[in-house]
Amino acid sequence: MTTAILVLGGWICGSMPWGYWLVRIFRGEDIRKQGSGNIGATNVWRVHGRRLGVPAVLLDTAKGFVPALVATKIAGHDAGVLTGAAAMLGHFRPLFLRFRRGGKVVATTGGAFLGVAPIVGGIGAGVWLVVFGLTRYASVASIVSALSLPLWAWIVGYPWPVIVFAGAAGGTVLVLHRANLRRLLRGEEHRFELRRKRKAARPSSASL
């Protein structure tokens, strides 16, 4: 019963569409109609800049981290893994958006691993930063980082449920980024910019 409650809590936390809510509250706009149409932190940052992008990253990470950590502390790694997976599922198909398309679960996955297996989560975050710094492709960084998770879980010596969860999480991130992979192969994937380019000022009438 305890595990079931923890998993339910993880799903509800994961279902909180912070990217959508932040843009709706502070811009009065629907992020699903902007950029890639994704509610995740990457699209929020790309469209609205770091002022909304940073909070979106932190909140999407927290909604995986907090329930997974609580479940792991209360009921062990098995419950932590299930709760983290529930948070990822909630982010993918949010209850609060009537189960419509959510995000690609990258930040929430990272948060879940920081809660269940902090060393693995930390190394995964480091891999993401290195690959992103080298390529400026958030999609490539996300895929490489996620696929590396089972290796780190095995090397560090976490129990098999964590290793299986890592493999499943990596596969999930890969599948959800298949459109990005197709764009990469066509040379159409856009490199991420930490700062949005300012729109060129229109010439004044005096300069015409």
Image (cartoon, rainbow, N blue to C red):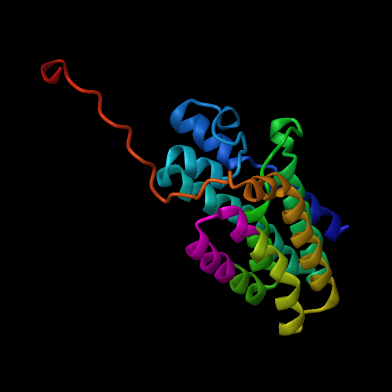
Q: Residue at x 50, y 50 (%)?
A: 191
Q: Answer yes or no: is residue 66 visible.
A: no
x, y percentage for residue 75? 80, 69
Residue 140 is situated, as x and y percent measured from the top left of the image, at 61, 58
Quadrant (top left/top right/bottom left/bottom right) for the C terminus: top left
Query: Does the image show residue 40?
Result: yes
Residue 105 highlighted magenta (yes or no): no
From the viewer's side, name the closer residue of 119 and 203: 203
Chief secondary structure of the magenta portion: helix
Could you tell me which quadrant the N terminus lies in?
Answer: bottom right
Q: Is residue 96 above or below residue 164?
A: above
- Does residue 130 appear left or right of residue 101 in this picture? left
What residue sits 69% from the left and 58% below the top?
A: 67
Q: Residue at x 59, y 47 (%)?
A: 187
Location of residue 112 (image quadrant):
bottom right
Query: In the rendered view, does 161 fall on the left or right side of 52?
Result: right
The extreme left residue here reads 206
Residue range of the region highlighted in magenta in the rendering: 125-142
Where residue 55 appears, as percent x and y from the top left, is 48, 48
Q: Residue furthest right?
A: 1
The residue most toward the front is 186
Q: How many marks?
A: 0
Q: Nearer the viewer, residue 47 or 39?
A: 47
Q: Give the vertical position of 74 relative to 24 (above or below).
A: below
